[in-house]
Amino acid sequence: MPLLAVAAAGDHQDPVWACRTLFDQIGAAQHKQFLCLGREHGFDEDFDHVRMLVSKAAQQQVWPRVIEWLNGQSVPEQVVEFQAAVGS
């Protein structure tokens, strides 16, 4: 089963270290990727718990990455539904 884990560098509720620890405990996956949303990883800001989901920056930088990852998982009908839901 594919797995995309997304953590936000500025998230104090669910810090990156905790998300990474959980991610590392998950066994083998067909396609396993950890994405940290922060300046050190090429994003314009260190996203926080809410901004990683609902900000204009998330719409421009985060959701396209999620859609790109989903496109790589060979589930086209689910990707279309997701794109419609997030307005991409």
Image (cartoon, helix red, strand yellow):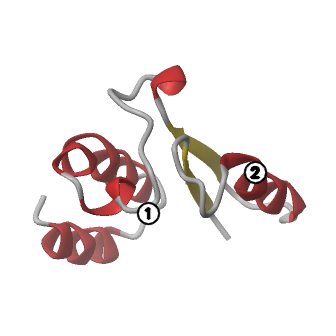
> Nearest the camera: 61 or 49?
49
Q: Is residue 1 above or below residue 34?
A: below
- Horizontal and vertical percent position of residue 56: 16, 49
Q: Residue at x 38, y 29 (%)?
A: 43
Q: Nearer the viewer, residue 7 or 82?
A: 7
Q: Mark 2: few, some, or many residues within 10 Å (few <14, many ≥20)? A: some
SS assignment at label 1: loop
Crowding at label 1, few (<14), some or many (≥20) Cα neighbours within 10 Å?
few
Look at label 2 and name its amino acid: Arg
Q: Residue at x 66, y 53 (%)?
A: 15
| 67 up-or-down from 10: above or below | below
Closer-to-camera residue (5/47): 47
- The vertical placement of 40 against 53, above or below, is above
Query: What residue sits 30% from the left and 53% below the top?
Result: 63
Q: Is residue 22 left or right of residue 30?
A: right
Q: Which mark identifies residue 20?
A: 2
In the rendered image, which residue does mark 1 sit on? 74
Task: Give amino acid for label 1.
Answer: Ser
Spot the residue most to the front.
12
In the image, residue 38 sits, relative to residue 8, either above or below, namely above
